[in-house]
Image (cartoon, grey):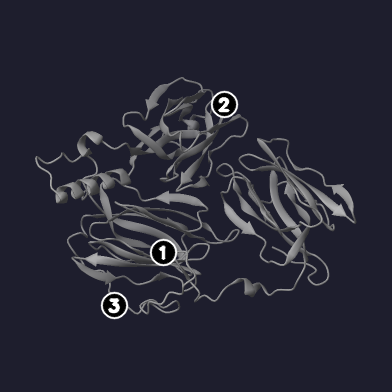
Amino acid sequence: MSYEGYGNSHISVGPWGGQSGARWDDGVYNTVRQVVICHGATIDSIQFEYDKRGSSVWSDKHGGTGCLKTNKIKLAHPDEYLVSISGHCGSVVDYGPVLVRSLVFESNKKKYGPFGIQYGTYFSIPMTGGKIVGFHGRSSWYLDSIGVYLMPLLQRNLSDNFADPRNYKINGTDEKYKDDSYDLEDEPKVVTRRPEINSNTKRAVSYGPWGGNGGIIFDDGVYTGVREVLLTSQGAVVSIQICYDLNGKATWGIKNGGSGGKRLDKICFDYPSEILTHITGCYGSTILRGPVVVKSLTLYTNKRKYGPFGEEQGTSFSSASNNGIIVGFHGRKGGFVDSIGVHVLEGTLPVSRPIPRPFYETSETSEVLQVYEAIRRAVPLVSGPWGGGGGKPWDDGVFSGVKKIFLTKGEAIYSIQIEYDRNGQSFWAVGHGGGSEGSFNMIKFDYPYEILTSVCGYYATLTGDDQRTGVVIKSLTFYTNKAKYGPYGEETGTFFTSTKTEGKIVGFHGRTGCYLNAIGVHLQQWSNDKYFN
């Protein structure tokens, strides 16, 4: 990132994005009147109408000719002007070039966007008190990168943008955290202890860690359960500290991570009736080409969901497993929580089969049945993947539902990318696969009224190609509670289907290389009313 000519002149900020494409520079004007954006899975092209001493000046179109949707931002010139842009940059397919994936424009009066897909590394103008008077960047068939010329309207120290680190927010409020047991700079003033060996240790299974390789290793060990979680965040997960249960006694682990962060969340479970079953989240860089850290965390119990905490950007992960409870955390830590994993005590919750109704029912047995049903619904089943063993494994994780599917096809399925719903917020997972010469298909569901219930298709060996390609997915068909979509691709080879278990699809996983080699689903089962009504 570069800064030039600060003072009475303009400032050049950026560009953000990749290094492909040809460089372009619109220069500096009085202000911006209009923005025309073409976008789909990425920002295809962008064009600006500037104002030069009262006259309209249109820039060249920066980018390619492809376009699924066009949006025009017409500012109420001269009273309205752009003050900020933000967005995401990343690859559309594995190993592809870095492009501008999404853009948000903000004026002195309102916000416009987002346009494109909010996935990848987040960027924004790192200062306020200025007016955008020009754009520059790189472009080819897409918008590869973008930067701005900013005219300062007032001088302001960048450090003023950051509040006192002691002014933490607690669960979205502006209160300061007053519990003396937690100091924002030092270790918490509570009794902490290293993990003890207990009967759960030999039965616990470790999952993860997910995230980066920086920092140092930490491992809280294995306990009986989890009572509380203290978590600080600021663009990523800065630190985490767990209050465990050890045979009926509260036991605090040490604080893992850094001492910064602007927000503190304290999550108290109703233990032992409320049990932590799995976690999901995202990991990625906080700055372009920076170290990979845990960007967000969401906690799931047998009763409810907590979070997300942090920013849901980057590669998603999930610890969801059948029939288990979390009894410990491990990972890597530095200035942030670099990676995180869990110790799971499996085979302890009867979630894999329904519980028959007792011969007679009391208020106590009824409450137990309701808890078991909530637990059974909390942990999705993993089905598949179906297809070949080539390529690299991937897993989008578990979400609330599926909103859109973007795929390319030709002689086989080249790539697939899914837009999920996570507690009312859209989340685009990374694209899986390769190839750019196939035809594009966008499947949009009427979510939440239309729910994806099953997927089927065919897989076969790709003939007439390099033997290393092996078995790939030849076709895909999607079924919802309202309609059928597809088939996409050629229905030849071995048939597969996910309909052996009824439910809704809440995530995808599989294997990819140059093609989609295999695909599977995370399935949330429907409730079995005959046992619980």
Mark 1 vs 2, N-terminal side? 1
- Mark 1 nearby-residue class (10 Å; few <14, some 14–19, many ≥20): many
Residue identified by numbered label 3:
191
> In this image, 333 relative to 10: left or right?
left
Q: Secondary structure at mark 3?
A: loop
What is the three-letter code of the residue carrying label 1? Arg
Circle 1: element type: strand
Q: Amino acid at mark 2?
A: Gly
Of the residues under marks 2 and 3, which one precedes in the sequence?
Answer: 3
Question: Could you tell me the amino acid type at mark 3?
Answer: Val
> With 127 as the anchor, is 188 left or right in this view?
left
Residue drawn 53% across the image and 45% down it: 430
**Where is the N terminus found, in terms of image quarters?**
bottom right
Quadrant of the rendering where the C terminus is positioned: top left
**Crowd tier of the residue under label 2, counting other residues whose Cα lies within 10 Å: few below 14, some 14–19, many 20 or above:** some
For the residues labelled 1 and 2, the Cα–Cα distance comes to 42 Å
* Spatial CA span between label 2 and label 3: 61 Å
In this view of the protein, which residue sits in the foreground, 58 or 205? 58
**Can residue 374 be seen in this snapshot?**
yes
Q: Residue furthest top?
A: 492
Query: Residue at the location (46% across, 60% down)?
Result: 213
Which residue is the site of mark 1?
Answer: 332
Q: Is residue 391 visible?
A: no
Q: Residues within 10 Å of mark 3 (few under 14, many from 20)?
A: few
The residue to which callout 2 is attached is 410
